[in-house]
Amino acid sequence: MPSLSSKEPDIFLVRTTETGCAGAPAGIRRRAPGFGRLAALVAVAACGLACVVEPVSYDLVLAGGRVMDPETGLDAVMDVGISGGTVRAISPEGLEGMEVVDVSGYVVAPGFVDLHAHGQDPFSRDLQVRDGVTAAFELEGGAYPVDEWYEEREGSWRIHFGATVAYGAARVLAFGEDERAATYEAASGEQIEAVQDTLRDGLADGALGVGLPLQYQPGASRSEIFRMFQTAAEAGVTVFSHIRYAGVVEPESSIAAVQEMIADAAGSGGSVHVVHIGSSGLAQMPTVIEMIDRAAAGGVDVTTEIYPYTAASTDIRAAIFDPGWRERLAADYGDIEWVATGERLDEASFNERRALPASEEARIIAHIIPEQELGDAIAHPAVMIASDGVGYIDGRAHPRGAGTFARVLGRYSRDEGRLSLMEALRKMTLAPARRLEDVAPAMRGKGRLSVGADADITVFDPETVIDRATFAEPAVPSAGIPHVLVDGVFVVRDGELVENALPGRGIRSGVADAD
């Protein structure tokens, strides 16, 4: 009898002769998933030479690639069989398919999951998918009304999407839509409870958590934020937080801000994900990452992420740049770049741009993140990868929206050797999927490449993958990523977008995949 392998296809066909086989009618019978080669061989032995066992022909086979799965540790040359948007077989032997694509020499990996993507517009999204992203979430800022945000994208999106409910929007509503008061003023008890009602409405519409850009809302007291953590904990969702402070000046330091988040998560019995620890931690990155790591080891549900660039980006009018910002950030005017032109600012141009009306674009890039600390954080096991990519305006933005994932694979893993390829993939696939899967069951099939997983797959060349977007030319797609599939559908093929491929689906809390 032929040898058996645990990597055999999970569906087989039994073709019977005209006289039938063990009571089976003539023709082709499809066995249920899990029938496997052993059962097929038993059937052959039972009916003699009247039966021939054939492996099923899958919708698509990715043939001969280096399959890497961070969950199981699989790292081997395999064929991947895909049908109905699901991985149906992974085998060292050749699989049959309606379509077979040779991917030899390439890595076949789970699609990249971006927990922090503000660029929820078609131009930004299409740069992300060419960076290998198959699901991109607006979790820091969030959305409101949540249902409308999802409805705008359903049926017309290339990759999967989802959002938290926006704490900022909830606060604006509680302050009668007075945005300045919502930013800087303390909330009354009645207003705090009004915020909780808005959050609950958004969570009822399937929001994936609460988006808390706290540094942009300095009027929110510590007691107000703890009350919000209680609401999130009651709903069983995570708070995705831009911490209260960034900088080295006490008491308004990065360390103090992370301590607040850990304490609120522990005290409420809830969970928190600290976004962009690079631009929030700055020179204190080593300490705050150690705090997060130790707290998690002690049972607090806290995680964090980073993007692989030494510059941040935001609106110059944000509260971050209120007086004293140079001392807090250990930065100066010349560290600030005007996105629209690439100009470095001085005191006069900084003050002029900060006074622009809200109706005008005022995006800046702040070159303030220390290189050594950044590289160490990217390699730290507790830190995920997420882009914080913002929407492009006339092709201009921070390059992180186009090159984050290829940059980690190419520069930090391959070229600098700061982390293994499997570890880099874990940080951008399995780890972010697990951050969401308790609240969003649909994520349990993502971030993995194994039989039964969703066929969200990124195929890349480990020797050539690299980011090409720069601060001068921020909208250049990454290189070395020839194929990207979402639900088994090519959205990038041979390095080019597949224009009419729109298989992306909304990921909501408590909503499992239809499969």
Image (spheres, rainbow, N blue to C red):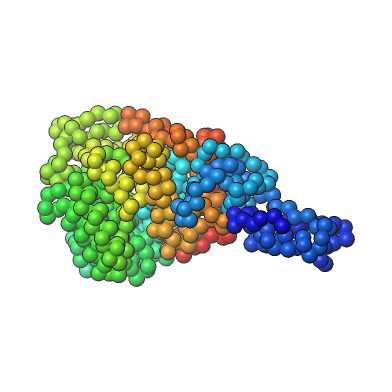
* Extreme-right residue of the structure: 19
Please report the residue visible at 53 percent of the width from the left and 60 percent of the height from the top: 513
- What residue is at 15 percent from the left and 42 percent from the top? 330
Q: Where's the N terminus, which quadrant?
A: bottom right
| Quarter of the figure with residue 164 | bottom left
Give coordinates of residue 374: x percent, y percent. 27, 43
Number of numbered discs: 0
| Along the viewing direction, whichever of 253 and 481 lies nearer the viewer | 481
Tell me if I can see residue 227 in this picture: no
- Say if residue 215 shows up in the picture: yes
- Front residue of 7 and 456: 7
Q: In the rendered image of this protein, does residue 227 appear above or below residue 94?
A: below
Q: Position of residue 404 (x, y in %)?
A: 37, 41
Look at 23% across and 64% down and name the residue there. Answer: 263
Where 473 sits versus 137, above or below? above
Residue in view at x 30 percent, y 39 percent: 309
Quarter of the figure with residue 490: top right
Residue 217 vertical placement versus 395 (above, below): below
Q: Nearer the viewer, residue 254 or 462?
A: 462
Residue 334: % across, % down: 18, 32
x, y percent for residue 113 = 43, 50
